[in-house]
Amino acid sequence: MNDLPQQLASGLILGAMYGLIAIGYTMVYGIVQLINFAHGEIVMFGAFGGLTAWLLLPQGTALALALPVMLVMAVGVSVLVGIGAERFAYRPLRGAPRLAPLITAIGLSIMLQQLIWGFYPDAKKARTFPQFSGSSVEILGANIQRGELFLLIAAPVCMIALGFFVAKTRTGRAMQATSQDPDTAKLMGINTDRIIVTAFAIGAAFGGVAAIAYGLKYGQIDFKIGFILGLKAFTAAVLGGIGNIYGAMVGGLVLGLAESLATAYIEHIPGMELFGGGAWKNVWAFVLLILVLLVRPQGLLGERVADRA
Amino acid sequence: MRHRSLLIITTAVAAGSLTLSACGSRGDDSGKSGGETTLTIGLDAPLSGDLSALGQGIRNSADLAVKTANKKKEVDGVTFKLQPLDDAAQPSSGQQNANKFVADDKVVGAVGPLNSNVGQSMQKVFDKAGMVEVSPANTAPELTQGTDWRTGTKKRPFKSYFRTSTTDAIQGPYAAQYMYNEKKLKKVYVIDDKKTYGKGLAATFKQEFEDLGGKVVGTDHVDPKEKDFTAVANKVAEAKPDFVYYGGEYPAGAPLADQAKKAGLKGPVVGGDALFSAEYVKLAKKNSEGDIASSVGAPLETLDSAKEFTKNYKAAGYKLPYEAYGGYAYDATWSIIQAVKAVADKNDGKLPEDMNETREQVVAAMQDVKFDGVSGTVGFDKFGDTTNKQLSLYEVKDGEHKPVKTGTFEEN
């Protein structure tokens, strides 16, 4: 068990990344009750945006200097794709039966994947992403890679900023109002269309940050990364209580920890040797999800809302 | 309750889309030119996706073989044509492609695929149609020796299936002997990806390594669709093995090696022919240094027989390198051409009118095909396995796989 600090750290880092992406699902769901299944691909676009920035910068640029540019580019690309998706794929379907935008989302996600596959140079296989060199940093008995430090800083900063934005600013409060009752919010003079676009943009921006974190952590990206990431982040959002921004982060952390600890320790439980290890981690993560939903159908931090209609 | 049922539907759809694979297929028509017969040789390999580096190498090499045969007029009155189809490393796509080849009465035989599990899905289709299939890269032993090969009861399941690569039955043990006897590393952590190829390879390695007296300090499995292996990497570092053996392919193997070494693994990551790719080094970067991969046959660069192939490949101006299986793909294609030639010779220079008849005679002729190919003397034993049992080990030095040992596997 002496690798416990390391496994905890790995789980938290992975979870923070899931959490950042889960924000995108939860924001959009909170406002328009739509599961934006193309969100994973928006993250993937962000990753390729960041990579493009790196490739455009003169060779030999220090990664620390390039990082802000890459971050701006990744967030920019993600936000553009996110807003574009809202404008051209979802807005025409507002008021349509719920299944219509859902299927559109799946179609959009396939389209976005194929766009990168088809048109990004050399993207039919994995492309390498720049990584920080240098040895890892030890914090509380766990080794943290340099690339993971970015995530450890970015995730809390983003969360605090988002919390402040939603609670304190005019737009943030308008968002809350729209989420509670879109029709009344409209009567109160809130431009709900603009609020919906803002929700998509913020979710996509977080996705862009997560995309850079992904690249720095794994050192490679490909056109398919959005699928698994999106699925995991969606799970995290549901686990934490979809619609609740803090829930998304908590859900992400719990999911990351569950995956990491299940890989490491389930096989040491007597009689469970066959069900441990890396191949079973997703099974345990989803067992956890089912258990949580059985006890708290609204998710860990979700509020029990009276169902409309 | 609308919300919750929507969530359930959504989850179900998401799970469903997991199993969907996007694959395009193109129609292609081949024609007969006056007097001359045009025969199509099908090719199935992952031309897109993670393993496309290997797949494109196979395609180009087969293409080269077909062009060479046409230029040399290897079979009088027959022009060969290559029809490549993409399987994206998916067994379902591979089977679809196999059905397509079988249905096309211009196709005389097929080269491919790369992946053993894809090969498994295609064997039946070809066998039923009596059409020859030669794989340049399948290494899972059960494809030719039946599922009970481990217990010594070898039985050939499909008589239309041949391969120019050696099997994991000797690839895994060969690496085990090298690591134990020559590298003097005694403690290993074995990981596989649970696919036909990876699982089999890891099992044969493990058995031989334990028989030699080595110690397996831990085993684990990973999901090759993911890129996050930090939890497994931490476990490996904690177990402090002398090295790691990975049964699987480079798209997951490279990040696994990278993450294990970052987590504190001190020894190399060793694996089979599916780690033997320049992409592996590119993806694992400097953490690939010292890693070892076994591969079938001798290094092409050292073989006299391969000189002409490497020269012609370069001259043909293909964009991507021939990679690990190029030579075997060339030989596989050439063996089909030779079998067609044998059939033509037997029938006084003419192929049977009926395509089914031709296909069947080609299968029969394939058993006796023998020629000097790129990888050495090419021929097949009674299981359809290559008679060339050579293997090589490569170590990553200065960002490149350098051959360290070539030989034939000898049982202890």
Image (tube, coloured by chain):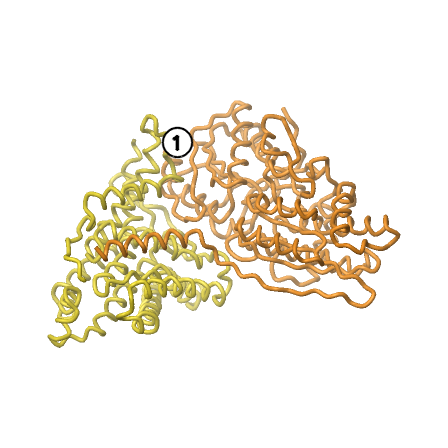
Chain colours: A yellow, B orange
Residue A169 percent coordinates (x, y): 13, 68
Q: Is residue B1 left or right of residue B80?
A: left
* Residue B193 to residue A58: above or below: above
Among the 4 quarters of the image, the one containing residue A282: top left
Residue closer to the observer: A22 or B184: A22
Q: Quadrant of residue A103?
A: bottom left
Chain at numbered mark 1: A
Front-most of residues A284 and B174:
A284
User: What secondary structure is marked by label 1?
Assistant: helix
In this view, the residue farthest toward the front is A309
Residue A62 in view: no
| Foreground of the two, B389 or B17 | B17
The residue at the point 57 percent across, 27 percent down is B181
Residue lying furthest right in this view?
Answer: B348
Q: Tell me residue B159's x, y (percent).
A: 69, 40
Q: Quadrant of the N terminus of chain B?
A: bottom left
Q: Is residue B367 left or right of residue A303?
A: right
For the point 59% across and 48% down, the residue is B114
B39, above or below A53, in the image: above
In the image, A23 versus B29, the foreground residue is B29
Q: Is residue B81 left or right of residue B92?
A: right
Name the residue rendered at 32%, 64% in the picture.
A68
* Residue denoted by label 1: A274
